[in-house]
Amino acid sequence: MKSRDIRQSFMDFFTQRGHHQVPSAPVVPHDDPTLLFTNAGMNQFKPYFLGQATPEHRRVVDTQKCIRVSGKHNDVEEVGYDTYHHTFFEMLGNWSFGDYYKREAIAWGWELLTKVWGLPKERLYATVYGGDEKVGADVEAERLWAEVTDIDPSHIKRFGRKDNFWMMGDTGPCGPCSEIHIDLTPDASGGALVNQGSPLVMELWNLVFIQYNAEPDGSLRELPSKHVDTGMGFERACAVVECTDRGRDFTRPISNYDTEVFQPIIRRLAEMSNQRYAPGMSEDKPSIAMRVVADHLRMVSFSLADGVVPSNEGRGYVVRRLVRRAARHGRDLGFKEPFMWQLVEILASTMGDVFPEIVREQTKIANLVKAEETSFLTTLERGIGLFEEAAGRLRQGEEFPGETAFRLYDTYGFPIDLTQVMARERGMQVDVPGFERHMEEQRKRAREARVQVVVSAAAENMDLPPTFFTGYEELDTPTHVRAVLEQGKELQIVLEKTPFYAEMGGQIGDTGVLEADHGSISIQDTQAKEGVVLHRAAIDHGRRPEVGEQVVAHVNHLRRWNIQRHHTATHLLHWALREVLGTDVRQQGSVVEPDRLRFDFTHNEQVKAEQLRAIERLIQERILENEGVSWFEIPKGQKPENVISFFGDKYGGRVRVLKIGGQGSGLVDAPIYDGYSMELCGGTHVRHTGDMGLFRFTSESAIAAGVRRVEAVVGNAAMASIQRDLDVLHGLSSRLAAPTADLEKRIEGLLDNVKRLEKELGTERAGGAVGQARQLVSSARTVGDIQLIVANVGQRDADYLRLVADALKGQFTGIAVLAGTGDGKVSLLAWVDKALVSKGFHAGKLIGELARQVGGGGGGRPDLAQAGGKDVSALPAALASVDGLLMAQVRA
């Protein structure tokens, strides 16, 4: 049985016993802010265990994509160095929600392992909960193992709470569990190693019997409905089933990486790198590197498929960190260029039938991985140089300095675990506490650089409640001054209530005026801290408001209305992007200002001009329909799925739904979900789509791999944008003496002339290269029995060197090394006649060494290679070394 057969046989076994097969949940748990990634099979079923939802099916079977990279489930450091730790894995599970219980779970588990998969019974052990002062031993499970299976009774073992009592958390559903372990020792003598953390006796399957609820006071309450939650690591199961048969020699270690789950990727890596993979617990660098890359490729690819975008925080940072770790190990395989992205195709072909998202998003995944590899490789060399320099100064047994580890992180993007990998390869430990101290100092500096609102308030012993916001319905509000904070050269004024919108959710803060009996104060910006709205004003020594003073807060009406137009347009834009580009579009950030909007979103290619026109047209049609824009509040837990929210955004217990289309405008009393655009949003908006007037894109660009940015304008700003373009058009018409209707034809004529002149120039340049080649052939010298040309052709670029090399091919049968110094940089080219390649001469290796001498890099084929460098002054010495380098190639 291979991996596909093993997974399918598990599904078939339980569907034949009344289970409904359900798809895997995404690895990004959008509805569970307590988790960075889905890390267990039970995550998607938590609402059933907690009594928050009723399952449609009482019996379920699935395979769940899981990622474990943080907290107590952090296996990153072990990945690649042993045979069974992974950052990404599948968890096979069968589930009973108040249906069958221990008897069936135990009997079916034993039947699948021994009768369907044929595992040797004498090597299997079952563990049960042995009891403590809180909960007695699980004698029922112990009895059932002896009653419904033919396991050796001496192989049923009791263990304590740590090993055999499962809890969801400090409170919530919990219960005893029964684990099945397999003995992989050569002589089947590993009974004493059960639950001892040895790879020779592995836990294979965990059957959890959920029968209690842990209460806040620490007591356990019996549940009215009892559940079964099982989990078996798919990769581990494949290792046991694929690598173990009844007649097998157990003297070799079993490895998950030797199965067909990983081997297609490892075989391709071995082929690409021309390195050999050693199976089992191999410790050579190439084999470790292949395991690391194979594991990290899976974690990264499935994360990207489920919507993660590489970044410097949260999930995005974890993905970036693993790409960098894999790229670093790729050097042990000889890879100096991006390589990991080429493996995505293999992954899609081997797992796409079970997880179609990996095929659907294959191009996006490959592009994102390649971009991340490329970005990191530009700094990898310099970072490794810093590491090697610091490590070389250390004596045997000294720790690698935490300060240097921090510099590698801060300057070169090396995660601490990557530095630990490099240190471990040299037999060193990293001063992690020292690294953390420097990290905390950086965080402290960052905190101090921010506006210290809370510190200022605390210094004055102020207890400021949240400011009540009136600005959804009015722009002028009578109110009282609650506090006045002095921060540098500005005042931060806190009011009892305010119509000023504080910057949030991408919408810029309001400006305006506070009017009082004794004059007015200009508000230049509005910010918020923990619900306290801060009206920022320059210190005016002639006017300072007093605490308790009555004022009237006036928002700048025109500016606010222009902001609202752009904010509502942002929601329309998000809707239209998803309509035209697909529902994989996810917002990554936005800025809403009076005269423009900016919107960042996930998309793996440039938005085509015709797509932008289609999006503009959709938005303009909705504006002309003049439908209502309304909003209402609901408890967060009642949010329907068709209302978009963004994981990571902070929402309170009650959330505000912004709806475009359907019934109502402005604030409505009752929620009606009949709009075509519905999102959670706390910003301010127009009342009707027609209030926006006109929508127009101004730019589209890439800001990161897989993330695009569009900017647009509406209303008066859109009209001004059109007028500017018309002014440019009329200016061109005047300068070219052509009516605007004829401009395109006139410009095409000018471009044709440019192309003709460039062609003539190119012909002349090629002729010069032919003449240069003739001169070089006449000056060629003989080294041994080889004709050799070594020449600096002056201030010429790489393109000219290629022209000369092409001209040489027809009149010279030797080796040519050419250099040019155009634009103050060094260009290098090496050409080797094919007859000499067979004698061991290699242009790529020659050019690589020459490039190193002039502070650059490059390479190429055995017969032709090019490179560049920065140090023009080093060129004469580099060219003088050519003879010696060629002789070294012959000796090699």
Image: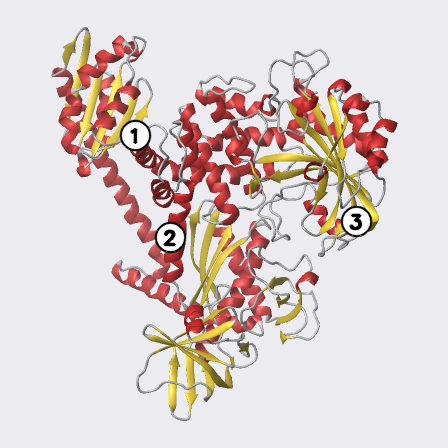
At 49% across and 57% down in the image, what residue appears?
589
Task: Give the mark nearest the N terminus, 2 or 3.
Answer: 3
Instruction: Indicate the amino acid at tag 2.
Output: Gln
Please rate how many residues cluster around mark 3, counting C-alpha atoms within 10 Å: few if below 14, some from 14 to 19, many from 20. some
Side of 106 relative to 460 (left or right): right
Residue on which the image places disc 2: 442
Side of 428 relative to 38 (left or right): left
Secondary structure at numbered mark 3: loop
Instruction: Indicate the amino acid at tag 1.
Output: Gly
Picture coordinates of residue 839, whole percent (x, y): 29, 8
Dividing the picture into quadrants, the one containing residue 94 is top right
Near-viewer residue (230 or 139): 139
Task: Give the mark nearest the N terminus, 1 or 2.
Answer: 1
Secondary structure at numbered mark 1: helix
Which quadrant would the C terminus be assigned to in this image?
top left
Task: Give the mark nearest the N terminus, 3 or 1.
Answer: 3
Side of 426 relative to 825 (left or right): right
Q: As drawn, which residue projects farthest toward the right?
A: 147
Tell me how the rendering is colored: secondary structure
> In whole angstroms, how far apart are the C-alphas of marks 1 and 2?
27 Å
The answer to whether 59 is drawn above or below residue 773 in the figure is below
Dividing the picture into quadrants, the one containing residue 796 is top left
Secondary structure at numbered mark 2: helix
Q: Are marks 3 and 1 in contact (CB under 8 Å)?
A: no
Instruction: Indicate the amino acid at tag 3.
Output: Pro
Q: How many marks?
A: 3
Disc number for residue 55: 3
Side of 5 relative to 421 (left or right): right
